[in-house]
Image (cartoon, coloured by chain):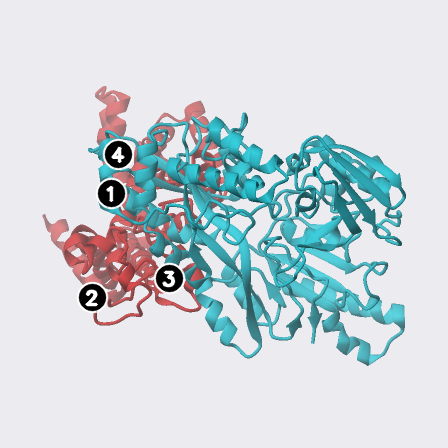
Chain colours: A red, B cyan
């Protein structure tokens, strides 16, 4: 009990000392609220979903349209709100896929060792050897451009990071007494791996996942911008920036605001990720 | 930055070579910028072979090659003007055409131009059978009467003057290419008689043209020594290049910027008619679009005015016919589809799709075309309103064309296409886009109607112009009734350029073609 209280105090103390992390948490919280409540919050829900409103095209930011409208008369604010759902859903899916694939492989590699370890780690090295975004572009090109394929394409080069993290964690956990104890009373290996080792690996995985959320949102927006992710008229931040590209010199708000949305969501997840990493890993504290 | 350095280097090299060659002084260097025309163009070169050319390389070809005659620019009292032929006449039955050739013309490679070269060029194009070679189908034989007279015999009456003035398939080139093969062209070589020679070519980056000193035209033309074409695929980049003075002429800027560019003191926008139109071709081989009622419903569902507003603004006008407006044979009194959702829903009901269609239809278009990009969401939206789910799939043009040429049952359901005619004759448009094809090439509605085929074939073969127009009109009416395609809009050409550029001509008979011949920099 005592250690929990001190952990809580540590958190509180930490946030007071680290306003940036607090800011990050606020951003992420806002992002989640926006994504969940987009249909309620959006001033023009129909336009947010992609329907055109030709009487209101290319309007500059005003009281009526806080962030202006695009070439099809769609309210940019509403589109950004709806876009947060696409980003959140897609990024979460990618994270879950890479954790689901990467973590067990890492634990198996670390616990079993030997040839199994070599095979798994060499395969993961193979994927890490390519620049991840480039590999993703190639994969989407082969599968055909849509959001599902973009998510698959980002998962493929991303899982090895989680394999590496859990493997190194497993290697050190393997030598710990509680694992030895379990082994000596005859607990089968799979049970040791997923009952005893997995829960102790989860912290670094969560830290990495929080940091990666930002990168994945950015990468997905990048793919959508290139026309390889979500397809118009989906409200996707990358698609919105791309749609505003030819208007950038005359109607700046079409691309700018979705860009700002990407900036803050990525920033939020990164700050939170950094904060968690510092709390969890005292060595990283300055 | 790298590109800019390359440009500076290029200018320096040109400067030094000029100074060295002529031993000229500072005045020459000041004139230098007037000697180099820099063009930003979106158009790739799909082939340099004049027999095979049938695509965007037309932008440059008119500077390198010439045909026997050329369709005159608007305002001329003659339909054609002489180029390599100085006179031509047809026999009364339209089966024999005699062309008198220009004397004293040489090809870029030094070979003399004569009747043999004309015969060789046409025969090579017909033999290869690539690109637009089909327009030469009526030609039965070509006879060299003497060095400067050629006789064409046709197997059926056809407007050979229109064919000879075509922007594709009718170029005259040096017979010396016989020994060089097709690869020689693709390496970036040309062997025409045009006012410019092809100096160098880096695929999808840069084309350098240099003045043909032996050009047969007046001695002071062409005025500009070199033309540097930079191939740029982005409209905003091109606008920046133009405004910064890094390009003298650009082929594409965002249409929203046209008026602001025109308002600048150092830039202007030249507009002119074009024989270009946009249509969406419906896959008539594949359910549910094999049903004419569904196709008509789609034609009624499209919000034509909005589509034009978002994609072209003032540069577009609603299509009145499958043939681009203003072209010979374009019927202006056809029944029209208007935007009428109630009627569209009613037609869907009649077709047995009251509850909508249970498959998502694929709609493709050339991803690099900003106009398609702009209106695509409106198409999706309007079709979903009448119960047709649509997936929008932009693909780069070359890939799109490959997909469209495949098995119709595997191909897209709706395919948008920017079309321009090969030559100023309705047959080519009507035949390329809707005549029965064994293997799809441009008929992306995969449309097949023997009665229609017969009508246009008869129209093409008749020497009587009134009769031809009547038949063409009947064929166009079928295309409206059967709705194998949605006829969206016709396009006005707009060419943004620096204020000091003079003499640029837009000739609607050669859409996309840029004539550097008459261009001067002041």
Q: In front: mark 3 or mark 2?
A: 3
Residue B521, by quadrant, is: bottom right
Instruction: Name the mark on residue A198.
Output: 4
* Mark earlier in primary sequence (3, 4): 4
| Most foreground residue, B108 or B206 | B108
CA–CA distance between discs 3 and 1? 38 Å
The local crowd at label 2, few if under 14, some if 14 to 19, many if 20 or more residues have their Cα within 10 Å, is few
Label 1 sits on residue: B343
| Whether residue B368 can be seen here | no
Residue A10, by quadrant, is: bottom left
The residue under the point 43% across, 27% down is B410
Residue A116: x percent and y percent?
42, 24
Label 2 sits on residue: A16
* Mark earlier in primary sequence (3, 2): 2
| Whether residue B382 can be seen here | yes
**Marks 3 & 2, CB-CB < 8 Å contact:** no
CA–CA distance between discs 3 and 2? 36 Å
The residue under the point 71% across, 65% down is B518
CA–CA distance between discs 2 and 1? 66 Å
Residue A35: x percent and y percent?
21, 52
Q: Secondary structure at mark 1?
A: helix
Q: Secondary structure at mark 2?
A: helix
Residue A47, by quadrant, is: bottom left
Residue B176 lies, with reference to residue B105, above or below; the image says above
Question: Which chain letter goes with mark 4?
Answer: A
Question: Which chain letter goes with mark 1?
Answer: B
């Amino acid at each position: 009990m005592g250690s929990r209280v001190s952990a809580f105090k540590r958190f509180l103390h930490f946030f007071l000392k680290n306003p940036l992390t607090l800011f990050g948490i606020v951003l992420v919280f806002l992002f989640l609220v926006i994504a969940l409540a987009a249909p309620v919050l959006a001033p023009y829900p129909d336009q947010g979903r992609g329907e055109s409103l030709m009487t209101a095209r290319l309007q500059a930011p005003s009281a009526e349209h806080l962030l202006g409208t695009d070439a099809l008369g769609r309210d940019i604010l509403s589109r950004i709100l709806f876009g947060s759902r696409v980003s959140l859903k897609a990024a979460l899916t990618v994270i879950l896929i890479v954790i689901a694939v990467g973590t067990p492989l890492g634990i198996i590699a670390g616990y079993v060792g030997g040839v199994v370890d070599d095979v798994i780690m060499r395969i993961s090295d193979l994927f890490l050897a390519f620049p991840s975004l480039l590999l993703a572009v190639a994969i989407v090109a082969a599968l055909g451009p849509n959001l599902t394929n973009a998510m698959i394409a980002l998962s493929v080069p991303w899982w090895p990071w989680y394999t590496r993290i859990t493997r190194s964690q497993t290697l050190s956990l393997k030598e710990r007494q509680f694992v030895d104890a379990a082994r000596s009373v005859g607990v089968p290996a799979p049970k040791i791996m997923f009952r005893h080792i997995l829960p102790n690996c989860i912290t670094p995985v969560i830290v990495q996942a929080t940091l990666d959320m930002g990168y994945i949102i950015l990468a997905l927006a990048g793919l959508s911008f290139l026309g390889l992710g979500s397809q118009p008229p989906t409200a996707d931040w990358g698609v919105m920036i791309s749609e505003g590209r030819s208007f950038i010199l005359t109607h700046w708000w079409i691309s700018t605001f979705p860009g700002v949305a990407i900036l803050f969501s990525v920033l939020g997840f990164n700050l939170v990720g950094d904060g968690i990493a510092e709390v969890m890993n005292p060595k990283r504290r300055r | 930055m790298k590109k800019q350095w390359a440009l500076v280097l290029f200018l320096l090299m040109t400067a030094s070579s000029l100074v060295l060659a002529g031993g000229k002084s500072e005045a020459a260097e000041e004139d230098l910028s007037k000697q180099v025309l820099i063009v930003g163009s979106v158009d790739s070169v799909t082939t340099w072979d004049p027999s095979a050319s049938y695509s965007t390389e037309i932008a440059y070809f008119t500077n390198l090659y010439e045909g026997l005659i050329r369709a005159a620019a608007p305002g001329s009292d003659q339909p054609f003007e002489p180029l390599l032929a100085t006179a031509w006449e047809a026999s009364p039955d339209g089966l024999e055409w005699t062309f008198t050739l220009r004397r004293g013309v040489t090809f870029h490679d030094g070979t003399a131009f004569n009747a043999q070269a004309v015969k060789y060029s046409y025969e090579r194009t017909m033999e290869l059978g690539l690109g637009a070679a089909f327009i030469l189908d009526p030609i039965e034989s070509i006879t060299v009467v003497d060095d400067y007279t050629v006789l064409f015999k046709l197997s059926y009456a056809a407007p050979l003057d229109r064919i000879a003035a075509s922007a594709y398939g009718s170029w005259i080139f040096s017979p010396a290419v016989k020994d060089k093969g097709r690869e020689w062209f693709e390496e970036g070589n040309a062997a025409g008689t045009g006012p410019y020679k092809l100096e160098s070519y880096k695929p999808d980056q840069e084309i350098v043209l240099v003045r043909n000193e032996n050009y047969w035209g007046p001695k002071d033309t062409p005025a500009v020594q070199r033309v540097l074409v930079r191939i740029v695929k982005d409209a905003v980049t091109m606008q920046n290049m133009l405004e910064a003075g890094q390009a003298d002429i650009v082929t594409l800027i965002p249409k929203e910027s046209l008026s602001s560019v025109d308002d600048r003191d150092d830039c202007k926008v030249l507009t002119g008619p074009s024989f270009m139109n946009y249509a969406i071709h419906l896959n008539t081989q594949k359910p549910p679009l094999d049903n004419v009622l569904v196709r008509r419903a789609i034609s009624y569902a499209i919000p034509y005015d909005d589509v034009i507003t978002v994609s072209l603004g003032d540069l577009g006008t609603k299509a009145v016919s499958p043939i681009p407006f203003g072209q010979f044979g374009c019927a202006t009194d056809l029944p029209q589809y208007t935007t009428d959702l109630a009627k569209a829903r009613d037609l869907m009901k009649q077709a047995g799709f009251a509850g909508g269609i249970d498959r998502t239809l694929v709609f493709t278009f050339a991803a690099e075309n900003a106009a398609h990009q702009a209106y695509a969401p409106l198409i999706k939206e309007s079709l979903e309103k009448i119960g047709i789910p649509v997936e929008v799939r932009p693909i780069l043009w070359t890939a799109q064309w490959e997909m469209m040429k495949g098995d119709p049952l595997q191909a897209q359901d709706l395919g948008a296409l920017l079309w321009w005619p090969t030559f100023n004759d309705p047959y080519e448009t009507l035949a390329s886009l809707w005549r029965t094809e064994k293997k799809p090439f441009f008929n992306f509605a995969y449309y097949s109607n023997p009665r229609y085929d017969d009508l246009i074939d008869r129209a093409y073969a008749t020497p009587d112009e009134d009769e031809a127009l009547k038949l063409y009109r009947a064929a166009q009416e079928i295309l409206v009734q059967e709705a194998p395609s949605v006829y969206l809009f016709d396009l006005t050409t707009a060419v943004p350029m620096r204020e000091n550029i003079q003499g640029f001509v837009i000739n609607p008979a050669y859409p996309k073609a840029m004539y550097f011949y008459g261009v001067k920099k002041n």
